[in-house]
Amino acid sequence: MIPRALHWDASRRTLCILDQRLLPGQVVERALTTLDDVDDAIRTLAVRGAPAIGVAAALGLVAAFARDGAPRREALLAGIDRLARARPTAVNLPWAMQRLREVIARTAADGAALLDALSAEAERILAEDVAMCDAIGAHGAALVADGARVLTICNAGALATTGIGTALAPVYTAAAAGRRVQVIACETRPLLQGSRITAWELQASGIPVTVCTDSMAATLMREQRVDLVIVGADRIAANGDVANKIGTYALAVAAHHHALPFYVAAPSSTVDPATATGARIPIEQRDGGEVRRLGDRQLVPDAAAVHNPAFDVTPADLVSAIITDRGIVRPPYRFTR
Ligand code: MRU
């Protein structure tokens, strides 16, 4: 059974997320009932992954205002602006919030009728995300041969979306078609989304997975223990430059050196034609404490500075192809509106 990042109860307008901060040790669902809850869950990575935070913010806004019988449009707009700022790199978040703003702009009604319109749009965003993941899986499975060993980083699986994932969608689809596939999950310092979340999701889904530290990846490639790399994306610029979890660029360089295919899998909602190149993608800088400590254990002397960007940019010329819900796109990349 492939786990799910969140659950939406449409009749009650309640949102429950799987708290990914606690994986793999504890599997805990948490209801998000206020704007503070939603904002905090996104900032602290209780819900994470580019598509999932866009969907969670949209549904979360509706859930947060559902208890307020007749919300005013100014309050809704302020809530949307707040959630849009929760994390800066994944474009799916401002993209989803912009869709809600457009609903407000074209809806004359206020109060409960306006919330109904927002709820319908948030549910469309959810349904589209599920369908885009399926389509990425259908297109991308052609790249995953029987026996393939797929290396990935971070978690771009079901738990980063509301469907079967992006980078892992071709893996799930190929496995469902009867192909033997195994995944090598880079652990993904500092928050360990690869070892904690990808490995947990894959073992729960019955896909063989091996965790490696991030610094092992190039050696595994040289030893011919990797057939292809598939990663997700937080934002793809018009020229095909890709922002994704820190460490992705190093994998692309290593894959290029070893003549291995390096694929990016992402839904249309992650493509940002308004951003010309990767140099213009805002990169989230996170608290140094994430690097300094692992649980209770101090890893860095107090006097040393730390650097903790959450994402990096892989130039388009290192990307063999981008697997989207609309098909497989190969260079040169020129994404338009
Ligand atoms: O900081 P995170 O865990 O939200 O980072 C997630 C990633 O980098 C994913 O690879 C990306 O969002 C694609 S998810 C389908």
Image: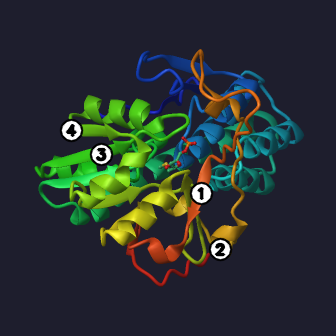
* Element class at badge 4: loop
Q: Is residue 48 above or below residue 298?
A: below
Quadrant where the N terminus sits is top left
Q: CA distance from mark 4 to mark 1?
A: 28 Å
**Where does the image place residue 230, in percent across and percent down from the top left?**
36, 58
With 219 as the anchor, is 115 left or right in this view? right
Q: Residue at x 16, y 61 (%)?
A: 145
161 or 283, nearer to the observer: 283
| Image mark for residue 184 | 3
Number of marks in the rendered image: 4
The amino acid on which the numbered mark 2 sits, given as a three-letter code, is Thr
Marks 4 and 2: in contact by CB < 8 Å?
no
Q: Which residue is mark 4?
A: 208
**Where does the image place residue 304, in percent across and percent down from the top left?**
73, 35
Q: Which residue is mark 2?
A: 277
Q: Residue at x 40, y 34 (%)?
A: 195
